Image (cartoon, rainbow, N blue to C red):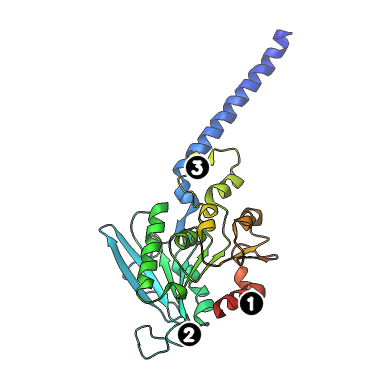
């Protein structure tokens, strides 16, 4: 009996070793490559002007010796010149925190959603994205967002500031609205938290220990005193609807979770319901 089962036992042990080695090897690779897996920036030469079809100007902030932040401002549609004091004042400003790909060039197309309603739009590129340079950590992203807010406060009251986040930017926007007052927080395709999202894809790994980035929207949202609106599509293949739906119990009376049927991660702008609801928020 022992001789009969010995080969089978050896095969099982051998395969267990292979599986353990694969598990550990993939885990190590995930740990060291997490920045490349999560963020996909495209740098732009700081001396090269953007060729957006929309009127715009740039704010370059020397944050410290190693950090330069680039913000692109889009004026309201009724004013093509942000420097002309004779033009009608904007209704307010939308601080737009974009997703994890490329740079502002990918997201400038969404500025008219707000400029057509009389708002300025400020888009910040994170370090490594576009013309921004400097260290990139979760806390640094929160710090850079706060600098953007403080700059906006030199011209706008909190009641005139809308904080808007898309995808990765929802994590940054939620933290900013947690620590600073604003008129409204709008989140487009948020996750419950970055670690919960990664766990969805890697359920067999101890994500909490492996990944440096937490981005806990679930912890920020309960402390946000401003009205909150969340947009999410049912067919989102990047941040599953079920993950974002976990934020619903954290919303306070008057907050909204707007479900876009058949909407995916990057096409909510194509849906009439998205625009009707967003327009109604901007007109209040």
Badge nearest the viewer, 2 or 1: 1
Task: Give the structural element (helix, strand or loop) at label 1.
Answer: helix
Q: Residue at left 53%, top 51%?
A: 194
Identify the residue at horizontal 59%, vertical 78% (top origin): 279
Coordinates of residue 155 in the picture (x, y in percent): 37, 77
**Label 1 crowding class (10 Å Cα cut-off): few <14, some 14-19, many 20+?**
few
Pinpoint residue 137: horizontal percent, then vertical percent: 40, 52
Q: Nearer the viewer, residue 143 or 263?
A: 143
Q: Earlier in the sequence, mark 2 or mark 1?
A: 2
* Residue found at x 61% / y 41%: 203
Q: Image point 42% across, 85% down: which residue?
A: 89
* Residue that badge 2 annotates: 77
Q: Nearer the viewer, residue 7 or 179?
A: 179
Q: Nearer the viewer, mark 3 or mark 2?
A: 2
User: Rounded to the nearest whole Å, what is the CA distance between mark 1 and mark 3?
Assistant: 41 Å
Question: How far apart, in angstroms, are the residues tagged by discs 2 and 1?
Answer: 19 Å
Q: How many marks?
A: 3
Of the numbered discs in the image, which one, if any, rests on residue 30? 3
- Mark 1 highlights which residue? 276
């Amino acid at each position: 009996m022992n001789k009969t089962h010995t080969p089978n036992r050896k095969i099982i042990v051998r395969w267990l070793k292979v599986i353990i080695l694969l598990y550990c090897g993939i885990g190590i690779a995930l740990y060291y490559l997490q920045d490349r897996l999560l963020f996909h920036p495209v740098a732009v030469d700081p001396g090269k002007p953007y060729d957006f079809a929309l009127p715009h100007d740039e704010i370059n902030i020397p944050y410290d010796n190693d950090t330069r932040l680039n913000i692109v401002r889009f004026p309201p549609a009724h004013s093509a010149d942000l420097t002309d004091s004779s033009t009608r004042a904007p209704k307010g400003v939308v601080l737009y925190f974009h997703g994890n790909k490329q740079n502002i060039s990918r997201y400038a197309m969404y500025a008219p959603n707000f400029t057509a309603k009389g708002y300025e739009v400020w888009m910040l590129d994170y370090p490594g994205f576009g013309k921004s340079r400097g260290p990139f950590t979760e806390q640094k992203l929160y710090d850079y967002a706060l600098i953007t807010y403080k700059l906006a406060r030199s011209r706008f009251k909190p009641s005139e500031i809308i904080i808007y986040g898309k995808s990765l930017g929802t994590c940054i926007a939620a933290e900013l609205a947690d620590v600073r007052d604003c008129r409204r927080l709008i989140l487009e395709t948020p996750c419950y938290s970055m670690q919960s999202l990664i766990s969805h894809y890697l359920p067999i790994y101890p994500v909490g220990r492996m990944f440096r980035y937490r981005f806990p929207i679930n912890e920020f949202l309960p402390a946000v005193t401003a009205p909150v609106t969340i947009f999410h599509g049912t067919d989102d293949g990047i941040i599953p609807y079920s993950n974002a739906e976990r934020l619903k119990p954290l919303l306070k009376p008057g907050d909204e979770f707007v479900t876009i049927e058949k909407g995916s991660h990057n096409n909510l702008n194509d849906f009439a319901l998205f625009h009707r609801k967003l327009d109604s928020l901007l007109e209040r």
